[in-house]
Amino acid sequence: MHGVTKILRRQKLGTLFVLVYLLYIALPTLQYSLLSPLFPHLQDILYPRASLLRLFGEHLLLVLLSGISAFVTGLFLGIGVTRPWGREFLQSVQDLTALLQTFPPVAVLTLAVPAVGFGFTPAYLALFIYSILPIVRNTITGLLSVPQPLKEAARGMGMTPLQVLIKAELPQAFPAILTGTRISIIINIGTATIGGVIGAGGLGVAIVAGLVRNNTAFVLQGAIAAAGLAFLADYLFELWEQKMNRQEQ
């Protein structure tokens, strides 16, 4: 009973946080009222060239597109190298994805900008490369941990290899895949702020402008929004995992 009460309390606090965060993003007056007492000496408190709501939308689009691309690619790579015909590539894929994540996003941007120019594309490529490792790694771990008797029982029921994968392996591996996706998206939210350096938009625009103009209010305005988005994504994934656990019980 105590555990249920604790979960309900957390859900109420989470819902309150989501509401306050969305109000902060949407209402410049709320942003100003929160930041102005901290910086009474500054004339410009809010970033003037774009609303925080617009920057939030650009940031969210960048994170979602790169995250979905990384999820699809990572899932298919993880499935491929755990099949009998792809096992010889298992170690190579793990090593390659680990190597890609050792490159800082700024280094990827430095290489991508001369090739594709400024804007959305190089930021997307950097985030895609940087976020694929957790998905690949957790997909492989999840699929390899599926009990062999379960797969044999599915084959004994006359299922094809594709049916075994979809109906037996993926449901068992999904919690691990979801955890990898959760890590990937949260990493992406923070890393996407570098998009402001190369004209890709997003919440990093306000942060970069604040650093250039030595305006801490701009930096804090964008940083609060980016950190809040990371907490929001983590909270939504937590609700998803709780729902899955209740369905399994």
Image (tube, helix red, strand yellow):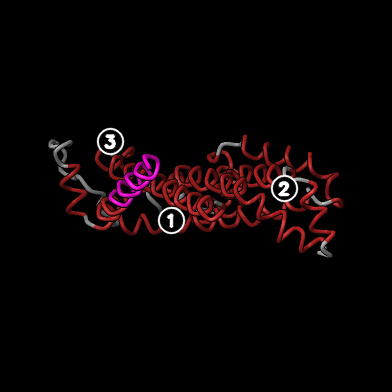
Specify which label sits upstream in the sequence, 2 or 3: 2
- When the figure is inspected, residue 64 is found, relative to residue 132, above or below; the finding is below
Give the main secondary structure of the magenta stretch: helix
169 relative position to 18: left or right: right
The amino acid type, in three-letter code, at marker 3 is Asn
State the image coordinates of residue 240 (x, y, percent, origin top left): 48, 53
- When the figure is inspected, residue 79 is found, relative to residue 41, above or below; the finding is below
State the image coordinates of residue 157 (x, y, percent, origin top left): 82, 63
| Labelled pair 2, 3 in contact (Cβ < 8 Å) | no
Which residue, given by chain and number where applicable, does mark 3 sit on? 214
The amino acid type, in three-letter code, at marker 1 is Leu
Rate crowding at label 3 as few (under 14), some (14 to 19) or many (20 or more) other CA atoms within 10 Å: few
State the image coordinates of residue 129 (x, y, percent, origin top left): 61, 46
State the image coordinates of residue 242 (x, y, percent, origin top left): 48, 49
Specify which label sits upstream in the sequence, 2 or 1: 1
Residue ID at (72%, 42%): 145
Which residue, given by chain and number where applicable, does mark 2 sit on? 143
Specify which label sits upstream in the sequence, 3 or 1: 1
Determine if the magenta segment contains residue 237. Answer: no
Rate crowding at label 2 as few (under 14), some (14 to 19) or many (20 or more) other CA atoms within 10 Å: many
SS under mark 2: helix
The amino acid type, in three-letter code, at marker 2 is Leu
Q: Which mark is residue 52?
A: none
Q: Which residues are magenta?
A: 1-16
SS under mark 3: loop
